[in-house]
Image (spheres, rainbow, N blue to C red):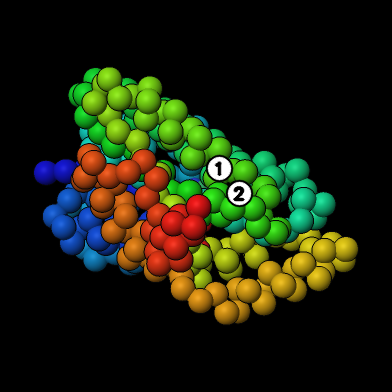
Amino acid sequence: MNTILITGCSSGFGLETARYFLDRDWTVVATMRTPNPDVLPPSDRLRILPLDVTDAASIARIVDAAGPIDVLVNNAGVGLLNAVEGISMDQAREVFETNTLGTIAMTKAFLPQFRERRAGVVVNVTSTVTLRPLHLLSVYTASKAAVNAFTESLALELESFGVRARIVLPGLAPETAFGTNARARMGMAIPEAYADVAAQVFAGFENPGEVTRPTDVAEAVWRAATDPSCPMRLPAGADAVAWAKAG
Ligand SMILES: NC(=O)c1ccc[n+]([C@@H]2O[C@H](COP(=O)([O-])OP(=O)(O)OC[C@H]3O[C@@H](n4cnc5c(N)ncnc54)[C@H](OP(=O)(O)O)[C@@H]3O)[C@@H](O)[C@H]2O)c1
């Protein structure tokens, strides 16, 4: 029986990925900052455990509580949409603490068991925003591009131990709580000097064209977890696939 641990399962991609693996008979450790058993179907293969990826003590507790796992999915993340001038250093730190350092800390915490068993997969969820520069996304993109670079180097480092690392790059997913959560945290308004650019960006969100659905991400995580021949970078969603092809 295979076991997967997923971060950020309260909503969006993490929640859908937990459902997807449960449906395929895996044992799922669904972690959430605030555990909510109502969001997933009851199952004797499901454990819902508390985890804040920015908290070292919380990470130490999850390693003990989860026991052996086969796949770690670093999905928890926060967004930030603003010009650099409108972003406080506290906000920038929060984004890096969660998206970048949280991923590194979780990976470090679970690697010893993977290396000792000479098996295991780390799947890091980043974003297609890392594929091209975009307005108002510099800090968020930097936090995810760092995870791309981290994962590619990590894969090399772990190859001889039989441990894999892969990146899933979702496109824009208006269906998840991501945008709302990011807006709630943005606090400071976009500086007036960037108002025209911001208006264009927000207009683009109104008519996004092709988008990514949470099931696209769950399918990509499944492939990354189960197919050793899967490429290092796996775009998830119709828009993501198109962006990756366009280079
Ligand atoms: N939606 C998009 O357009 C999009 C596109 C590309 C990539 N992504 C990436 O995909 C991942 C999932 O996003 P989503 O769209 O599913 O958004 P979401 O619905 O907002 O889910 C994000 C999850 O991360 C959790 N989280 C935030 N900070 C955390 C922390 N310190 N410790 C543990 N969990 C934490 C949230 O938990 P709480 O409920 O406790 O806040 C939530 O469960 C993120 O890494 C995001 O950057 C999203």
Disc 2 designates what residue?
Answer: 141
7 or 135, nearer to the observer: 135
Marks 1 and 2, how far apart in space? Answer: 6 Å
Residue 184 location (% of width, % of height): 65, 64
Q: Residue furthest bottom?
A: 207
Q: Quadrant of residue 73?
A: top left
Q: The residue tagged with tag 1: helix, strand or loop? A: helix
Residue at position x 22%, y 39% from top? 228
Residue pictured at 20% horizontal, 24% vertical: 117
Query: Percent position (x, y) of residue 31?
Result: 37, 49
Few, some or many C-alpha atoms within 10 Å of disc 2 (few <14, some 14-19, many ≥20)? Answer: many
- Tell me, yes or no, if residue 5 can be seen here: no
Q: Residue at x 58, y 68 (%)?
A: 180
- Whether ligand 1 has any atom under 8 Å from the Cβ at mark 1 is answered as no
Residue 101, image quadrant: top right
Residue 177 makes an appearance in the image: yes
Q: Residue at x 16, y 57 (%)?
A: 24
**Is 82 on the left-hand or right-hand side of 209?**
right
Kind of residue at badge 2: Thr
The answer to whether 93 is drawn above or below residue 41 in the figure is above
**Would residue 170 be found to the left or right of residue 229 on screen?**
right
Q: Is residue 156 left or right of residue 183?
A: left
Query: In which quarter of the view is residue 94 placed?
Result: top right
Q: Is residue 202 above or below residue 150?
A: below
Counting from the top left corner in percent of width and height, residue 209 is at: 51, 76
Give the residue pinned by disc 1: 145
- Secondary structure of the residue carrying tag 2 is helix
* Foreground pick, 71 / 162: 162
